[in-house]
Image: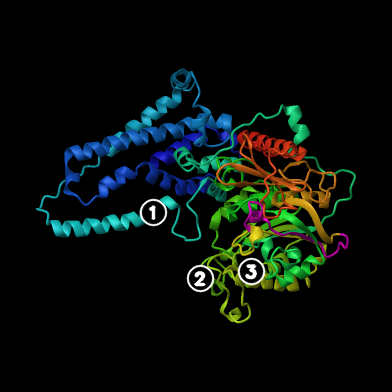
């Protein structure tokens, strides 16, 4: 751990100009959270061999094997950390596993390595030698002595097996990043929790961790389907701000509802293929009557961690969830970062334990000024026993907290009650009967919680000057067959509701998606800033309206007009008219339809634009 901290200090000292005003204490303290897993990952064999309940571990040969393993492994990890002291100046982030692909075909790799080590950056090699010398000297001070008394095997085994089990539990928690059941194994994105600027994540992280946590993760490869000029004709993620239009200084509230698929909303299933259709969202159905709601709206991912990058930053889940990808340390823009420059207060709310799902880290990177979680709620009496605070009381807390904010403000909330195991508060057991799916009762409860939120919020002074955006994080359990298709699995509601805008009503058949929310809101407000977003303004009749998602390991699904097409980067895998063939039973690929080339080019354009911007860290204007 000391070796990692020293290499972090060297990293900072050689790159101080990149980190003006950095809070080093916070960054270095946060770094320990990533150093521990890295040490466990890389020294796992040493740890295991040192804890095995066998007397052979006192043998000199056994100890020599351990010793040389430790020397070699830590020499490599130290070299990786020190190499990034220099590489950072070219990449602006820690090296990830993508380096193996990037240099896999380099013909003069040995020459480059020699020049790096002994010509251009010889001083880093000297630092490595000096630190390794100190490490070897320190390790040699540790002497494993065989017990002088004769060992009673039964007591020896009992004692050391117990030690092994206890250490095993502690090691598991250390490698995972904690014991909290709501926390996924720690990833690169979690470093965002400790920084003020995305670039500072490079101080918090270490290179061995960054490489190991991105191994076997699919990466975007630079595509060259089109020339730069051709690509601009097909697709561009660069958005120019609105000019010549009055700005609306409205509050913006986005609500992302857990597992709130379109399947459960009656108003969006008036033409269901199933005669026995039943919905579970009476309040949402009533709200739709006063909102602009999109009937052909799609999520961009299938996991909760996919949703926030899509909704607030217009970043889809390509190949793997963005927050777990090689590019999660990129500098990005979002609704919060853009509206912050317009004088908005911004905050994110999630009723789970703080840090759960990596949301706190990502939303900090996205520019949200404040975070309100289970800690800020500060009443464990409303804990559901699994995920966090029940939706109804937390939504009330959401409304009451916003009532203390100075306008204009932008907030985003992520609910949690309609998540497996789909529990609801005891007082509602007899009220919400649910349906054929375990999720249905949870959906009914969250819909009711949403109703109570609007009942409270509607009495507050900021309510009428607010644009509400409601969507799901992803779909979940399927009962009706049309939602089991490759397209149906991504169908969610997207609702825009502004109490003061009577024109913002009606069911809209335009194809839209979660990554459209950011640009749609910016254009609705008349924001003049330029920004990068991979979606488009859903309400702009002149814009390109499409939806994208990944299915299977590598099939890129794109929707535009009446068609959905699957493309794997080389060939079309399927094509359906999803409006006339809702069950996707009649494949239209290779039938000569002009839409096939149009959608294929669109898929290629999006893949090329995303991969280029992600790899080159150009996700801001």
Which secondary structure, mark 3? helix
Image quadrant holding the N terminus, namely: top left
Residue plotted at (75% across, 73% down): 455
Mark 2 Cα-neighbour bin, 10 Å: few <14, some 14–19, many ≥20: few
* Between discs 2 and 3, the one toward the N terminus: 2
Q: Position of residue 173 (x, y in %)?
A: 41, 55
* Residue depth check, mark 1 versus mark 3: number of the one nearer the observer: 3
Q: Is residue 491 magenta?
A: yes
Mark 1 Cα-neighbour bin, 10 Å: few <14, some 14–19, many ≥20: some
Q: How far is mark 1 from mark 3, CA to CA?
A: 35 Å
* Quadrant of residue 618 within the rendered picture: top right
Q: How far is mark 2 from mark 1, CA to CA?
A: 23 Å
Q: Which residue is mark 3?
A: 443
Q: Which residue is mark 2?
A: 385
Query: Is residue 100 toward the left or the right of residue 41 in the image?
Result: right
Q: Nearer the viewer, residue 597 or 188?
A: 597
Up/down of 101 relative to 443, above or below = above
Q: Which residue is mark 1?
A: 172
Q: Position of residue 589 (x, y in %)?
A: 68, 40
* Between discs 1 and 3, the one toward the N terminus: 1
Q: Nearer the viewer, residue 162 or 582?
A: 582
| Any part of residue 274 in sight | yes
Q: Nearer the viewer, residue 25 or 286?
A: 286
* Between discs 2 and 1, the one toward the N terminus: 1
Up/down of 613 relative to 493, above or below = above
Q: How many marks?
A: 3
The residue sitting at the left extreme is 150
Q: Is residue 534 magenta?
A: no
| Any part of residue 256 in sight | no
Query: Is residue 448 toward the left or the right of residue 357 in the image?
Result: right
Which secondary structure, mark 2? loop
Q: Which residues are magenta?
A: 484-503
């Amino acid at each position: 751990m000391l070796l990692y901290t020293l290499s972090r200090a060297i990293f900072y000292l050689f790159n101080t100009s990149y980190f003006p005003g950095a809070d080093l204490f916070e960054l270095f303290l946060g770094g320990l959270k990533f150093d521990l897993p890295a040490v466990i990952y890389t020294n796992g064999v040493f740890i295991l061999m040192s804890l095995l309940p066998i007397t052979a571990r006192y043998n000199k040969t056994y100890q020599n094997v351990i010793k040389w393993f430790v020397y070699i492994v830590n020499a490599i990890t130290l070299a990786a950390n020190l190499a990034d002291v220099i590489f950072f100046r070219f990449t602006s982030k820690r090296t990830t596993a993508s380096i193996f692909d990037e240099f896999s075909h380099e013909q003069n790799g040995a020459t480059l390595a020699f020049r790096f080590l002994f010509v251009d950056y010889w001083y880093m090699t000297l630092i490595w030698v000096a630190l390794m010398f100190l490490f070897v000297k320190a390790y040699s001070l540790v002497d494993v002595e065989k017990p002088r008394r004769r060992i009673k095997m039964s007591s020896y085994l009992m004692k050391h097996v117990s030690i092994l089990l206890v250490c095993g539990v502690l090691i598991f928690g250390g490698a995972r990043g904690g014991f909290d059941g709501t926390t996924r194994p720690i990833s690169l994105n979690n470093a965002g929790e400790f920084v003020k600027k995305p670039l500072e994540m490079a101080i918090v992280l270490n290179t061995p961790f960054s490489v190991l946590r991105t191994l076997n993760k699919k990466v975007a490869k630079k595509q060259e389907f089109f020339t730069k000029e051709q690509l601009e004709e097909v697709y561009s993620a660069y958005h120019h701000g609105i000019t010549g239009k009055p700005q609306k200084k409205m509050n913006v509230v986005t609500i992302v509802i857990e597992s709130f698929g379109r399947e459960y909303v009656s108003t969006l299933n008036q033409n269901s293929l199933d005669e026995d259709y039943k919905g579970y969202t009476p309040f949402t159905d009533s709200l739709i009557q006063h909102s602009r709601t999109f009937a052909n709206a799609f999520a961009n991912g299938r996991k909760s961690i996919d949703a926030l990058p899509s909704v607030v930053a217009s970043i889809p889940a390509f190949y793997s969830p963005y927050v777990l990808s090689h590019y999660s340390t990129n500098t990005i823009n979002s609704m919060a970062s853009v509206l912050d420059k317009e004088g908005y207060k911004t905050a994110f709310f999630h009723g789970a334990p703080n840090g759960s799902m990596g949301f706190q880290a990502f939303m900090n990177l996205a520019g949200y000024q404040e975070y309100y979680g289970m800690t800020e709620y500060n009443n464990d009496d409303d804990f559901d026993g699994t995920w966090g605070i029940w939706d109804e009381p937390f939504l009330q807390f959401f409304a009451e907290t916003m009532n203390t904010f100075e306008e204009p403000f932008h907030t985003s909330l992520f609910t949690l009650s309609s998540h497996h195991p789909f529990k609801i508060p005891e007082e509602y057991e007899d009220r919400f009967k649910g349906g054929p799916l375990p999720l249905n009762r949870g959906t009914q409860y969250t819909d009711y919680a949403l109703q109570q939120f609007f009942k409270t919020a509607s009495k507050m002074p900021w309510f009428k000057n607010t644009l509400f955006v409601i969507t799901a994080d992803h779909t979940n359990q399927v009962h009706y067959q049309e939602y089991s298709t490759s397209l149906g699995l991504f169908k969610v509601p997207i609702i825009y509701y502004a109490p003061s805008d009577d024109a913002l009503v009606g069911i809209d058949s335009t194809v839209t998606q979660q990554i459209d929310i950011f640009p749609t809101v910016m254009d609705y407000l008349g924001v003049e800033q330029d920004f990068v977003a991979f979606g488009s303004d859903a309400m702009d009749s002149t814009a390109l309206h499409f939806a994208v998602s990944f299915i299977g390991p590598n099939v890129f699904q794109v929707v535009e007009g009446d068609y959905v097409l699957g493309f794997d980067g080389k060939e079309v895998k399927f094509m359906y008219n999803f409006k006339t063939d809702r069950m996707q039973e009649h494949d239209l690929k290779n039938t000569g339809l002009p839409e096939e080339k149009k959608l294929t080019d669109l898929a290629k354009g999006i893949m090329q634009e995303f991969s280029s911007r992600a790899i080159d860290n150009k996700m801001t204007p």
